[in-house]
Image: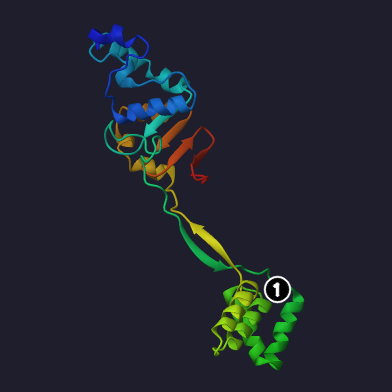
């Protein structure tokens, strides 16, 4: 505004209680170790028609020469914030784990000949080898596990059983590996098209003219430049 323009031009004289998105953008700019941040609502004198018109005519230079444009895809107004800039400002990613048997290497020709031989000579061993391929573990480990399960019969000595389990389980049972699963980020194109920001007329030039963009959705952050688009997870979007 014209009545506080002189005050606003002084260092550290921003108004208190700025919208959340602007405050987060200021924090992000500092973390990026950059000095300047353009905010339309603060940098354009809103009640001076001539100054406002002149600034609007120069917005192509603002976006095309900026290091990066910060975009809030989350929410519908200036108080939505930039999820992830502040601690606990978005939900942590949910990581689920599954335990899978380690897949062996593809069988070599000798293994295949042995397998085919057992089909005619030893039906039980042929069946075991088939199971091994189905559950993806080594035959020796499977056989050791089967021997353990068959021989570990209950007896009068509980201590003896516990000892047998302790010495056999970790060494002989088929090994496992952990598969961690996290939610897959949607492509940036989809995140853009479902956002309020994308459908505002004022933001069209931001999208069109910016050399680089950092896009904050509710769960993921994307980076895009003229040749590359990537999500924070490492996914090429």
Which residue is at 64% across, 90% downward? 124
Classify residue 37 as left or right of residue 109: left
Classify residue 216 as left or right of residue 150: left
Q: Nearer the viewer, residue 12 or 111?
A: 12
Q: Residue furthest toward the right?
A: 110
Which residue is at 45% across, 52% downward? 184
Q: Quadrant of the N terminus?
A: top left
User: Dot 1 corresponds to which residue?
Assistant: 107
What color scheme is it? rainbow
Whether residue 61 is visible here, answered yes or no, is: yes
Classify residue 12 as left or right of residue 167: left
- At which x and y percent is residue 104? 65, 69
Which residue is at 45% across, 32% downward? 213
171 is higher (above) or lower (below) than 28: below
Give the image quarter of residue 70.
top left
Whether residue 210 is visible here, answered yes or no, is: no
Q: How many numbered circles does the render carry?
A: 1
Which residue is at 37% across, 38% downward? 83
Q: Nearer the viewer, residue 33 or 37?
A: 33
- At which x and y percent is residue 195? 32, 40
Give the image quarter of residue 76.
top left
- At which x and y percent is residue 201? 30, 29
Q: Secondary structure at mark 1?
A: loop
6 is higher (above) or lower (below) than 132: above
- At which x and y percent is residue 20? 31, 30
Give the image quarter of residue 58.
top left
10 is higher (above) or lower (below) than 37: above
Packing grade of label 1 (10 A; few <14, some 14-19, many >=20) is few
């Amino acid at each position: 505004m014209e009545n506080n323009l002189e005050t606003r031009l002084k260092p550290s004289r921003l108004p208190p209680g700025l919208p959340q998105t602007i405050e987060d953008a200021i924090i992000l700019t500092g973390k990026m170790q950059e000095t300047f941040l353009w905010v339309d609502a603060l940098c354009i004198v809103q009640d001076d028609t001539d100054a406002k018109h002149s600034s609007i005519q120069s917005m192509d230079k603002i976006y095309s020469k900026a290091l990066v444009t910060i975009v809030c895809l989350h929410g519908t107004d200036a108080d939505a914030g930039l999820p992830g800039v502040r601690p606990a400002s978005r939900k942590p990613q949910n990581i689920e784990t599954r335990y899978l048997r380690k897949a062996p290497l593809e069988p070599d020709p000798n293994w295949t000949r042995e397998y085919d031989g057992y089909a005619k000579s030893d039906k039980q061993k042929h069946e075991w080898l088939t199971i091994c391929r189905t559950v993806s573990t080594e035959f020796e480990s499977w056989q050791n596990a089967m021997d353990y399960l068959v021989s570990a019969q209950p007896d009068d000595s509980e201590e003896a059983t516990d000892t047998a389990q302790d010495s056999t389980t970790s060494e002989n049972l088929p090994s496992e590996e952990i598969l961690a699963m996290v939610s897959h980020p949607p492509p940036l194109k989809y995140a853009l098209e479902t956002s309020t920001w994308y459908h505002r007329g004022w933001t069209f030039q931001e999208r069109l003219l910016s050399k680089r963009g950092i896009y904050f959705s509710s769960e993921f952050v994307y980076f895009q430049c003229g040749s590359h688009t990537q999500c924070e997870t490492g996914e090429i979007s």
